[in-house]
Amino acid sequence: MDDMPDTPEKDTLWPTLWRGWRRRCPNCGNGPLLSGYLTVRDHCPVCRQELHHHRADDGPAYLTILIVGHLMAPLLLFVFTTWRPEPLVLFTIFGVGCVALSLYLLPRLKGAIVAFQWARGMHGFAPPS
């Protein structure tokens, strides 16, 4: 049994993070969060939630590097020790894989960080009601 009582923060954090991961407004889940690849909108076009308060800064980049490194390094070691491919082939495959995974994760992690800040009422966001 869960010793922690159900709080609004506990109930709304994971759905809010999921909305951010999908690059949607943390408040309504319908409006787009980003206006470009990594540019957060000033406000949601659907619910008018102000989003300019966010302070994602370098967090998404750090998390992307952490995740890509922890996924690709063991995979690189496994592929090298199992099949011993040519160095150029190995570099090409893992170079493209690292870039592709980084490009996929970066905007999603930025959305999740902005959503986390919104859910916790950080950096000028009012706590969700």
Image (spheres, grey):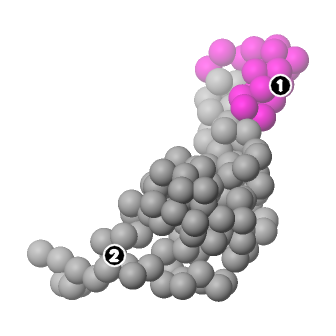
* Location of residue 9 in the rendering, given as x and y in whole percent from the top left corner: 37, 79
Determine contact: label 1, label 2, CB under 8 Å. Answer: no
Give the labeled residue for mark 2.
Answer: 10
Magenta segment main secondary structure: helix
69 to 126, vertically: above or below? above
55 to 29, vertically: above or below? below
* Location of residue 51 in the rendering, given as x and y in whole percent from the top left corner: 65, 69
Residue 81 sits inside the magenta stretch: no
* Location of residue 1 in the rendering, given as x and y in whole percent from the top left corner: 12, 75
Q: Quadrant of residue 52?
A: bottom right
Left or right: residue 21 compared with residue 9: right
Amino acid type at image mark 1 = Phe
Give the labeled residue for mark 1.
Answer: 91
Residue nearer the viewer, 115 or 99: 115
The residue drawn where x is 78% and y is 65% is 58
In the picture, the disc for residue 119 is none
Amino acid type at image mark 2 = Lys
53 to 27, vertically: above or below? below
Q: Earlier in the sequence, mark 1 or mark 2?
A: 2
Residue bounds of the magenta highlight: 82-100
Q: Residue furthest right?
A: 88
